[in-house]
Each structure stands twice: as structure tokens, then as C-alpha cells.
Image (cartoon, rainbow, N blue to C red):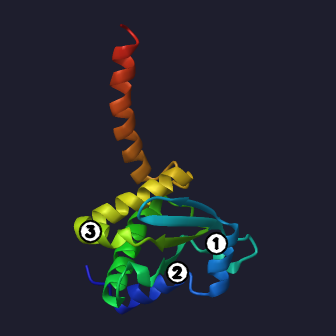
Amino acid sequence: MALGPRAASGRSGRRLSRSAEFDRVFRHGRSQANRYLVLYAFPRPADDLRTQDAFPRLGLSVARRVGGAVERNRVKRVLREAFDAEAAGLPANHDYVVVARPDVRELAEREGLAGTRTALADLIERAGLRSSDSSASAAAGTNGDAAAAPVAETGSPS
């Protein structure tokens, strides 16, 4: 699934690149954290021209504590893929910054994209950012409700 030059250039608008954009998300955004990642989210101002974009924007912060350049780039690539997979269920007019903690390197090596996506999805759920109409949340809600419903039904008649 290689990206062509047009697809790669289209992604640049979906990233935070300026220091001021990162600062705004860090200072004014809400955050959630787990052992592997910290997720910051902040809605773009209505007067911002990029607010009209139909997609969320991502900024990544992967410090040297995570590893050398090769390891950091691998972690960033996996985080971008995980975010792209989860982005369909996120509000489009928000900016997000994901800060990688040192343990994420082992997670990415051990479980790859699936483990990293699970860690990110957990933060998104806890932050209450998932749109109610997304297919990912519908599938997660169905699985969770299906497991909870029989317990409630069998517990009530007894």
C-alpha cells in the first residue's frame, strides 16, 4: 500500500508543523495519557481557514528517550498509520498532538500497528472524542453492548 506522490503531498495539510500550532494544542487542549502515549486535542478556531478542512490534523512529538533516529522514525510511522485508521471517527475541526512515551517503542516492536492503534483508541475513547456515527465506535459499542446485554438480561429475571 505505497503512497504515490499525490497522496503523500496531500497528507502534509493534515499535519501540525508550526511551533505555534503545537503550543496552542498543548496549552489549551485537553489531554489523556496512558503508559505509552499522551493525546492532546483542541478544536480549531472558527476563524482559522484550516477549520474548513474536512479532516483532523496530527502533530507528533517523539523524544530521543524513545530511541535513536531509526527507532523514532519507526514509532512516528506507526503512530501516523494508527491515527489515520482512527481519524474517521474523530471530529474533523480538531488538532491533535500525540506525545510518545519511551515504552511505545517496545509496544510498536512487540505488537506493531495493532497494539499502537489500541493504545491510541483507548485514549480517544477516554477523552470522549469519538463521533457517534463512526463505524469504529459502532463496532466497539456493539461488541461492548452485546457482551453487557446478556449479563444484564440474565441478571434481571433471577
Q: Residue 151 falls in which quadrant of the image?
A: top left
Q: Position of residue 25 (x, y in %)?
A: 64, 72
Label 2, label 1: how far apart the Cα atoms are: 15 Å
Q: Is residue 63 above or below residue 96?
A: below
Please provide percent x and percent y for residue 118. Answer: 36, 58
What secondary structure is marked by label 1?
helix
Query: Which is closer to the viewer, label 3 or label 2?
Result: 3
- Residue on which the image places disc 3: 112
Sequence-first tag of 3 and 2: 2
Identify the residue position indicated by label 2 in the image. Answer: 15
Q: Residue furthest right?
A: 47
Picture quadrant where residue 150 is located: top left
Name the amino acid type tagged 2. Answer: Arg
The C terminus is located in which quarter?
Answer: top left
Q: Is residue 26 visible?
A: yes
Picture layout, residue 130 above or below residue 44: above
Q: Dot 1 corresponds to which residue?
A: 26
> Which residue is at a point 40% across and 87% down the rendered structure image?
8
- Circle 3 crowding by C-alpha within 10 Å: few under 14, some 14–19, many from 20: some
Of callouts 2 and 1, which one flags the residue occurring earlier in the amino acid sequence?
2
Disc 2 + disc 1, Cβ < 8 Å:
no
Which one is in front in this view, the residue at disc 2 or the one at disc 1? 1
Q: Amino acid at mark 1?
A: Phe
Q: In 3D space, how far apart are the residues under numbered discs 1 and 3 (Cα atoms)?
A: 27 Å
Secondary element at image label 3: helix
Q: Is residue 121 left or right of residue 108?
A: right
